[in-house]
Amino acid sequence: MDNKQTKESQAINWEYLPDTTTLSQYLGRKELIELSKCCKRYRNQLNRKILEYLNLVIWDSDNDEISNEDNYNIKYEIVLRLLKIDLGNRLKLVKGVNLDCFINPSFSKRLIKLIPNIKLLRFINNSSDSNLFNILTTVLKGFEQLEHVEFVYDSELLGNNYARKQIFQKSIKSIKINFDGYYIPIADGLTIYDTIDSSYINLQSLSIITNRTLQNLSCGMQNLREVEIIDTGNLDTSTLVTFLITNPQLKKLITTNLEYKDEEIVKTVLCSKYIESWCINDRDGNESVTRNLPSNYSIKYLKLDSRIFTPLALKIINACKSLETLEFNPNNNLNNLNLSKFNQRVNILKLFNVYRYYPGFEKIIKKIDSLKLFNQVHVSYSCEGDEVVYEEYSFDLLKNYKIITITSGVGIFKLIS
């Protein structure tokens, strides 16, 4: 769209204003900005969505005045000045911030004053300051309305042994850890994560990486609904099982990097009456173990990573008697999953991160077509360089499914009744 718009076009007011929440699910930030130029009356509504999240990384990379400056003290001054000039009183609309940049205590305090209404914080350890823990503490305490915190895993930051006091506010609702690289174990000792205990009654979603955190929350957390359990190399099976048993209210479970040397963890999850979603990003440590798994009637969504061995995957699938959606990566281990041994129909099958030229994929598609076990099949491709292209070569011979939706890199096929 041409930025040089006439006054007439800028003055247009639409009679019908699309719902901004729905619209933002389909349009990116840049598209929303362009759309806001079309209707003056609509612009105020879109501003709340456009300015909802502030990414300082983009400011750094997209602004030559900032990116070309090597002195970080000067860089901080430029960022703060531009924020005041460009956004002014609209800074109160900012509810989330991504601190994926070099910061120091002084900059942190001044930034907090500019955007005090932050509810979502994404923090990445890119700081050159040696006093990183104090910087993090300043940020967490300064944003008094903070509800959601997201870290990129850093064993130095999260494993700080000087964390004797609780640094997260009691109003916090979710704490998430993302991994960017290897699972480096955290040394034994008190970490900033180990200060989380049953006093955090507002917690609804949490990533757990230490045995101490599991122990702290094993008294039961009534409001906790979503948990990701991540093993960086030292999680104790019995401690994990105790946590799951004492928190039967969990609805969504993600297990990451666990090694199933016996069936205790799997059986405990399947015995749950309330878990509806289970994402398994794990590796099976003993393919030969015989597993007689209990039936589960609560899990409706199951996602399997390609690292888990096929025999265990098949047993878990068949144990989930109320399964509505099955999602897995068909590459590597799961390309040999024997679909003919499924003992039930599943409404939706999702195949994700499919390598378009993987030789075993066409075999899987033909098997799906012949068995007719799924009402719908969703296929999404993953290519190098984030280039996503839809390819029909695997589907032109399908007899029992028809294409109902095609977008860039995604095909949805429906069983012909």
Image (spheres, grey):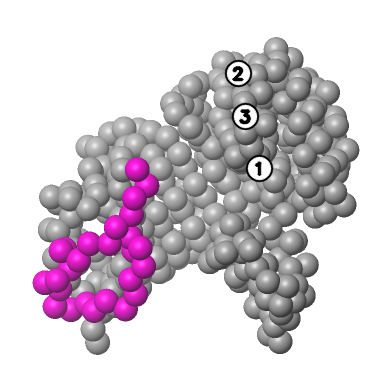
Q: What stretch of residues is rendered in magenta?
A: 385-410
Residue bearing the label numbered 1: 55
- Point out the tag, 2 or 3, that comes first from the N-terminus: 3
Q: Which amino acid type is marked by label 1?
A: Asn
**Residue 3: percent from left, percent from top:** 62, 62
Q: Which amino acid type is marked by label 2?
A: Glu
Task: Point out the residue furthest to the top here.
Answer: 130
Q: CA distance from mark 2 to mark 3?
A: 27 Å
- Point out the tag, 1 or 3, that comes first from the N-terminus: 1
Residue bearing the label numbered 2: 156
Of the two numbered discs 2 and 1 in the rendering, the one whose residue sits closer to the viewer? 1
Q: Residue at horizontal 11%, vertical 72%?
A: 397
Of the two numbered discs 2 and 3 in the rendering, the one whose residue sits closer to the viewer? 3
**Residue 192: percent from left, percent from top:** 70, 26
Q: Please state which of residues 408 and 411 is positioned toward the viewer in this rendering.
A: 408
Q: Please state which of residues 109 and 59 is positioned toward the viewer in this rendering.
A: 59
Q: Residues within 10 Å of mark 3 (few under 14, many from 20)?
A: few
Residue bearing the label numbered 3: 67
Q: Residue at horizontal 36%, vertical 67%?
A: 407
The residue tagged with tag 1: helix, strand or loop? Answer: strand
Q: Please state which of residues 77 and 213 is positioned toward the viewer in this rendering.
A: 77
Q: Is residue 4 above or below residue 7?
A: above
Residue 378 falls in image quadrant: bottom left
